[in-house]
């Protein structure tokens, strides 16, 4: 190949990966409108494909040790060359439980709790990335918690018909009943553990092209200080840079970032226009308390932004700030 050329290829003998899924759930009526369930849910993924860099360098040996730079068929190429290989494996295990209650007068309450652990090779949850360390003899260093692992996840949801309108406690007659009646309030509160993150270091001394350098952890236990902005989130003195051609001692995804709590509210009402035609009006307030949910801190030792966090993480949304949505929906 000419100098500077790159490729992505499949192996000659293609091995397909697979996922095993296991679950067992017990559900029971608990009396007086209460019901609950508890169960185990797990998956085991084997031979997951990853875009492995096969033009990696060895610690301390730099470009001279890259196969496509200085190998038998030397081409002078230092860029990553990718082969899609079935190298990865992942485990997910969880305890999942729910508790529900149907009250009289249009009230409902549900609570769901998940306790889980997700382990794989850092840090490629979707199989479309690459291991942080592609060198076979150091491949075991990639095994860690996955970036999407959340130990605790509590979801509390409720629905309530507002006590206004016909046959309700307040404003049950006349024009006031017609205007104020029929509205339904719902809410979802989420309380979730933070996501894991790694503390990295400059890779100059490692001199292994294609690999990510980890910091050296010099304290057995790392204090979490919960600061944000320029205030440190974790003890910055627990890690140091690496000055030798070795990988740092800090495991990938060894620390966990800020958790978050969030509450959303919705107000709905349906108006019957004529038979088979219903108009629904809705007001939704997301992040009703306007609470910032901070992202994981910058975590490369020796940089000016080390151990600081100014960004927010809107979880599954496009923005973290409180915002209000108004909507009208026609059903027919």
Image (cartoon, rainbow, N blue to C red):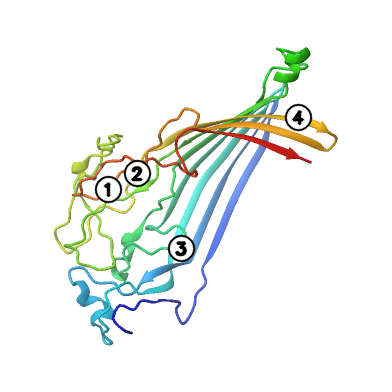
Look at 33% across and 65% down and name the residue there: 139
> Can you identify the residue that label 4 sits on?
271
> CA gap, disc 1 to disc 4?
53 Å
In-image side of 95 versus 144 (left or right): right
> CA gap, disc 4 to disc 3?
48 Å
Disc on the earlier residue, 1 or 4:
4
Disc on the earlier residue, 4 or 2:
4
Closer mark to the observer between disc 1 and disc 4 = 4
Q: Is residue 80 above or below residue 98?
A: below
Label 3 sits on a secondary structure element that is loop
Q: Are marks 4 and 2 in contact (CB under 8 Å)?
A: no
> CA gap, disc 4 to disc 2?
45 Å
Q: Position of residue 133 (x, y in %)?
A: 31, 64
Closer mark to the observer between disc 2 and disc 3 = 2
Closer mark to the observer between disc 4 and disc 2 = 4
> CA gap, disc 2 to disc 3?
22 Å
> Can you identify the residue that label 2 sits on?
296
- What is the number of the mark on residue 127? 3
> CA gap, disc 1 to disc 3?
24 Å
Label 1 sits on a secondary structure element that is loop
Q: Position of residue 256 (x, y in %)?
A: 35, 43
- What is the number of the mark on residue 227? none
Disc on the earlier residue, 2 or 3:
3
> CA gap, disc 2 to disc 1?
8 Å
Q: Nearer the viewer, residue 31 or 158?
A: 158
Look at 25% across and 68% down and name the residue there: 209
> Can you identify the residue that label 1 sits on?
299
Q: Are marks 2 and 1 in contact (CB under 8 Å)?
A: yes
């Amino acid at each position: 190949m000419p100098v500077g050329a790159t490729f992505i290829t499949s192996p000659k003998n293609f091995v397909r990966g697979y996922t095993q899924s296991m679950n067992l759930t017990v559900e029971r009526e608990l009396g007086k409108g209460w019901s609950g369930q508890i169960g185990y849910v797990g998956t085991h993924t084997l031979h997951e494909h990853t875009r492995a860099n096969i033009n990696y360098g060895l610690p301390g040996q730099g470009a001279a040790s890259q196969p496509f730079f200085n190998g038998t068929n030397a081409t002078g190429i230092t860029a990553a060359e990718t082969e899609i290989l079935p190298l990865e494996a992942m485990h997910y295990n969880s305890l999942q439980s729910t508790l529900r209650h149907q009250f009289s007068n249009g009230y409902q309450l549900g609570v769901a709790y998940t306790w889980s652990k997700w382990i794989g090779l850092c840090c490629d949850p979707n199989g479309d990335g690459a291991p942080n360390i592609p060198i076979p003899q150091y491949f075991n260093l990639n095994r860690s918690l996955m970036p999407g692992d959340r130990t605790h996840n509590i979801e509390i949801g409720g629905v309530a018909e507002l006590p206004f309108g016909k046959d309700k406690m307040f404003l049950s007659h006349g024009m006031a009943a017609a205007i104020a009646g029929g509205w339904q309030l719902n809410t979802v509160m989420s309380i979730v553990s933070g996501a894991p993150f790694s503390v990295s270091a400059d890779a100059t001394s490692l001199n292994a092209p294609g690999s990510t350098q980890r910091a050296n952890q010099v304290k057995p236990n790392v204090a979490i200080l919960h600061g944000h902005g320029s205030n440190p989130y974790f003890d910055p003195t627990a890690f140091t840079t690496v000055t030798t051609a070795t990988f740092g001692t800090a495991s990938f995804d060894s620390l966990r970032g800020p958790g978050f709590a969030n509450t959303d509210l919705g107000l709905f009402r349906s108006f019957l226009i004529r038979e088979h035609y219903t108009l629904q009006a809705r007001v939704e307030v997301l992040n009703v308390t306007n609470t910032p949910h901070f992202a994981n801190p910058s975590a490369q030792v020796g940089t000016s932004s080390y151990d600081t966090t100014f960004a927010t993480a809107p979880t599954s949304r496009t923005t973290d700030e409180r915002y209000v949505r108004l909507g009208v929906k026609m059903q027919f």
